[in-house]
Amino acid sequence: MSTPNPTRRSETARVAILDAALDLVAEVGYTKVAIEHIASEAGVGKQTIYRWWPSKGALMFDAFLTLAGGPDGTPELPDTGDLAADLKLVLRATIVELQDPRYDLPMRALHTEIVHDPALAADYVKRLDEPMRELKKNRLRAAQNAGQLAADLDLDVAVDLLFGPILNRWLQRTGPLTDEYVDHLVDTVLQGLRPRKD
Amino acid sequence: MSTPNPTRRSETARVAILDAALDLVAEVGYTKVAIEHIASEAGVGKQTIYRWWPSKGALMFDAFLTLAGGPDGTPELPDTGDLAADLKLVLRATIVELQDPRYDLPMRALHTEIVHDPALAADYVKRLDEPMRELKKNRLRAAQNAGQLAADLDLDVAVDLLFGPILNRWLQRTGPLTDEYVDHLVDTVLQGLRPRKD
Amino acid sequence: MSTPNPTRRSETARVAILDAALDLVAEVGYTKVAIEHIASEAGVGKQTIYRWWPSKGALMFDAFLTLAGGPDGTPELPDTGDLAADLKLVLRATIVELQDPRYDLPMRALHTEIVHDPALAADYVKRLDEPMRELKKNRLRAAQNAGQLAADLDLDVAVDLLFGPILNRWLQRTGPLTDEYVDHLVDTVLQGLRPRKD
Amino acid sequence: MSTPNPTRRSETARVAILDAALDLVAEVGYTKVAIEHIASEAGVGKQTIYRWWPSKGALMFDAFLTLAGGPDGTPELPDTGDLAADLKLVLRATIVELQDPRYDLPMRALHTEIVHDPALAADYVKRLDEPMRELKKNRLRAAQNAGQLAADLDLDVAVDLLFGPILNRWLQRTGPLTDEYVDHLVDTVLQGLRPRKD
DNA sequence: AGTTAAGCGAGACGGTACGTCCGGTCTTGAA
DNA sequence: TTCAAGACCGGACGTACCGTCTCGCTTAACT
């Protein structure tokens, strides 16, 4: 009785709501955005939002997916054969995106909810983190097959090491996100903390 | 007229408020805790909270500092001479703490606010992150001097690599926080992603 | 956007609010009645009160009208042909009403607000004072036509003289409201202060 | 223990408080005046007000007495031998005063409290109403002795008839306070409502 | 093609919490 | 002891949103 019929859903309303949500977050900040604002900005009844999304976080998540370009929006990582250079390129692009106001605020919004809502976190892992992670692992696997990475390397740990520190800096603002930092990070991860043998 | 006189401040009230804040966060979760609840739980007028803290986040931050044991509460990191073992020990202790409900919820609360409030983030960096980071760097510096770490290693990056991934896993729940993961992480960071030369 | 749509108004809530208002005034006195109390006593959200009434005074006014029986609740004044007797009857009934706790407190409440709120005072004059005054003037006009009152008498002044002093005594408690006072008043007003010629 | 020692009372503070009270009532209206405002406007601690006055109404009452010129401030009513003329003179002066902003607001404030506070009402009757009433009765008594008023006239009722309607008009704003109204009132009261015999 | 039932914009409703204001009490230090 | 100053507990203010609930209207889908 309670589950609405998706075939009758108004696409116009759906898009208007997601757009309004992103606009408002960018304008006034996530915590100050109210469902009522989104509804009135989208020219939509409140019930239409509550009918299709269980929470503001879930709505923001969908809105964010829209922004990220959908499930097939992200291409493979570049592979020039030079692993360090490729990684630096990708990470530099990442920090540009993280500092683009159009992405920064909604992404922070999303992370706020993830911190407190395990269900949403699971959704995040499945629909955003894992696909991205797979792309990253693909590139690393290629390098591993080419003998550029240790044969017994755990690629998940490798991804964590390369991308985790950047996400942390961004979330906690523990330091500036510069190209120098990124380059330094890649070099250090690749070679390890220990002194070189050669 | 607006800045209150700190010498007249009631210590009883201050402590009652911080205690109530921690208790309530542990009980019902950060987002459901209202200033009104804290006030009534602490037997205090709302104004007494608003007089001394600018926001719920700032209050939580102070409460969290109380919990963390104050400025001088954290001792040096262990130094047995075996860097890998020492780091694993510290990181294992860290993940135990992160999963202790008494720390987990307030710490998530704090991070929620940090994500959105740059002022609070700055405070966090200065009063929590930097002191801890200094301790970690001290241990790494000792290892560096002993020739166990590369002479040109950036210790800040090293700290990011060792502790960042764990914080990420915890915040985003991208994976379980196990001893195995921690050990694996330390080994990988120390030796780097590249194949061993020997 | 600000004016609510009256057709959607909940009659249940409206009545519950007015009833609660009267009950609480009778119980604890007007100045101690808070909008919050009325709302909770009526089982209603505060906003539902603020949506339809601009002030506590305006709400009390409506509640008082309910009590007074509505616009057509008051019948004509009696006319037995004996003007003095009829007036005494009406005035005696008036002082009974003024001393009935069910009317006394809300009416005082109303007057408190009228003293300070010219808009409310205008409403009072139009919706309560004038209709009553018209009834009184009707009776006096009949007497005037019958030659019992001076042909050039200003009926408004006459009404002021007959009913004003009673209202004053009641409001300011300058003296007791007794039948004797009322009778004396009517006689004195009718005959004037000057010595009789006969 | 609770009654303060009046001999130690600071006259400076007392006067400053009463002045501040009157000023603020004139500025922002009685209901919007807070004890805190009066205290800070008078450069006085809140406690100094609470020490000497039991309520805002009582304070206003004292302030109003200050304004009215003190206990011996009011002289006898004029007596030219022409009662009607003398009364019209006095009543015209009264309506001028009632419409003087300097008196209007504090006097309304006083009446607001009197309506609800029997103790204050008793004080008002004793310290303001009765002295004034005595002066009025003195003038009427002189006229009575001169045969200008009925020998059996109740002077209290006479005072009520002459001054009550004006006070009502002022409090309830049921009509304008003009010289014409006043003159008409005096004439009607003196001669009564009935047709003249002559 | 006409009927029905869903989704829709709108917005009133019972609530909860906000951040502010003020009431009345209590404490401190100076005069 | 009074006073100026002002922190304290309590409680109401008027506002903002929550999530639920009708209302008519529009629009598919199923007789």
Image (spheres, coloured by chain):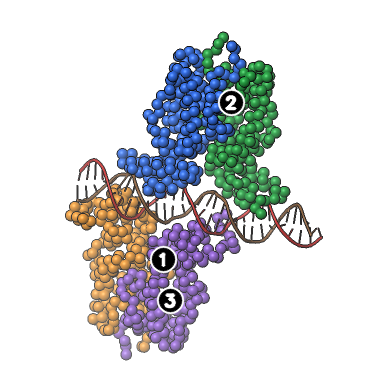
Chain colours: A green, B blue, C purple, D orange, E red, F brown
Most foreground residue, B119 or C179: B119
- The amino acid at mark 2 is Val
Q: CA distance from mark 1 to mark 2?
A: 71 Å
In this view, the residue in front, A157 or D189, is A157
Count residues near mark 3 (Cα–Cα under 10 Å), then give few for <14, some for 14-19, many for 20+. few
**On residue A157, which mark appears?**
2
Return the x and y of residue D158 as percentages of the image width and height. Answer: 31, 77
Q: In the picture, which quadrant includes the C terminus of chain A? A: top right
Q: Residue at x 26, y 54 (%)?
A: D51
- Choose mark 3 or mark 2, whichever is in front: 2
Distance between the alpha carbons at the discs numbered 3 and 2: 95 Å
Check disc 1 and give the amino acid type: Val
Residue D138 versus residue E2: which sits nearer the camera? E2
Q: Is residue B149 left or right of residue D118?
A: right
Q: Position of residue A57 (x, y in %)?
A: 58, 42
Residue A91 position in % (x across, y down): 60, 25
Q: Please, which chain is the residue tagged with disc 1 on? A: C
Which chain is disc 3 placed on?
A: C
* Residue occupied by mark 1: C25
Residue A80, image quadrant: top right
> Which residue is tagged 3?
C156
